[in-house]
Amino acid sequence: MKKGTLALLIHSGTENWSPDRWKRRFNDVCADRPVWVASEQGGNPADVHYAAVWKPAPGELASFPNLRVIFNLGAGVDALMADKTLPKVPVVRVSVGDLTGRMTEYVVLHVLMHHRQELYLRDSQLETRWQPKFQWSADALTVGVMGLGTLGSDAVEVLVRLGFQVVGWSNSPKTIKGVECFYGKAQLDAFSRRADILVCLLPLTPETRGILNRELFAKLNRSSPMGAPVLINAGRGGLQNETDILSCLDDGTLGAVSLDVFATEPLPPDSPFWTHPKVVLTPHNAADTDADEISKYVARQIERFEAGERLENLVDPARGY
Ligand code: NDP
Ligand code: OXD
């Protein structure tokens, strides 16, 4: 019997999201299943049973009348949830060791960069200045991680191992060894007051939009050895108020920031973030989705679904993540 088509709707334009590359990988792992890239001519929308997507255009998925499952090719589903015409079928998101490991690398890299005063040391090198500053220990700093899901829970484990004091914040209560856990809006202030370095790994939802703002930054711990608190955001640009970040860097409410995500991506060339001396900026590549790993993950999920087994890592549309 002919297998239902897997449609690839991939719109991003970066090297990692080349539709041809993804098609080759899916052809390898989905034996006998037609794999159709949306930009190709031909193909009958009625044959499409599965869609693997990254930032599909609003309305694009509604054109498949027999769609059974949507596979989001990344962890964050905010772009999908914003589509008012999204078909009412299960949405599976990425939660795999490969992506998690990459994000933990990013978090550790940037926490250490600020903890070990790398911005100061790079400036010193440029100015041929041999002038080390006092070096505090890891346990002199508290790292506050917003979001203790797949990514946050892995990152905190490594931060604890490195000797940092770690606090975490999530929607529901958690127990994580070595981490003081806070949850819900009512405990956000208590959590924030503890953090010297604030790491954001939240999903973008109506509840979290704009949560990284001046009011929150002003509550972060003001008496750390670093002098002023630091923000690291690898969640989504919509979580941050960018005007507040810039003004808080300028008036000392924040000492420095590492930002991987922005309200507008690609970041426009005239954005002040590009040249601000207290900003470490990366082009939304904290944790790339690996085509080899994720095509296998999607193929496995389709097999499970067709065998009548439960799909994993389902998105709850009511929560938006
Ligand atoms: P999960 O869904 O596994 O975890 C989300 C966490 O956020 C959970 O702990 C959840 O709480 C918490 N949370 C959600 N809403 C709230 C809220 N209103 N208040 C408090 N806590 C909240 O997601 P992942 O860890 O897999 O990914 C997180 C995000 O990281 C993605 O949504 C995506 O935006 C971003 N990302 C960025 C990448 C990059 O390269 N920059 C790469 C991959 C992901 P609870 O556990 O109680 O539900
Ligand atoms: C993701 C991302 O959500 O790469 O996976 O941003």
Image (cartoon, rainbow, N blue to C red):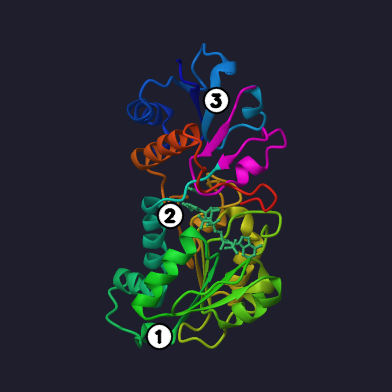
- Of 246 and 106, which appears nearest the observer? 106
Measure how far apart labels 2 and 1 are at the Cα level: 25 Å
Residue at 65% across / 50% down in the picture? Answer: 320
CA–CA distance in space, label 2 to label 3 = 32 Å
Q: Residue at x 48, y 59 (%)?
A: 150
Residue 66 lies in the magenta stretch? yes
At a point 68% along the width and 42% down the height, the residue shown is: 82
Range of magenta residues: 65-91
Query: What is the secondary structure assignment of the residue under circle 3?
Result: strand
1 and 3 marks in contact (CB < 8 Å): no
Quadrant occupied by the N terminus: top left
**If you read the primary sequence from the N terminus, does the residue marked by circle 1 or circle 3 appear first?**
3
The location of residue 34, given as percent across then percent down, is 43, 19
Task: Check disc 2 and report its element: helix, strand or loop.
Answer: loop
Relative placement, left or right, of 20 versus 309 is left
Q: Which mark is residue 286?
A: 2
Q: Amino acid at mark 1?
A: Asp
Disc 3 marks which residue?
Answer: 49
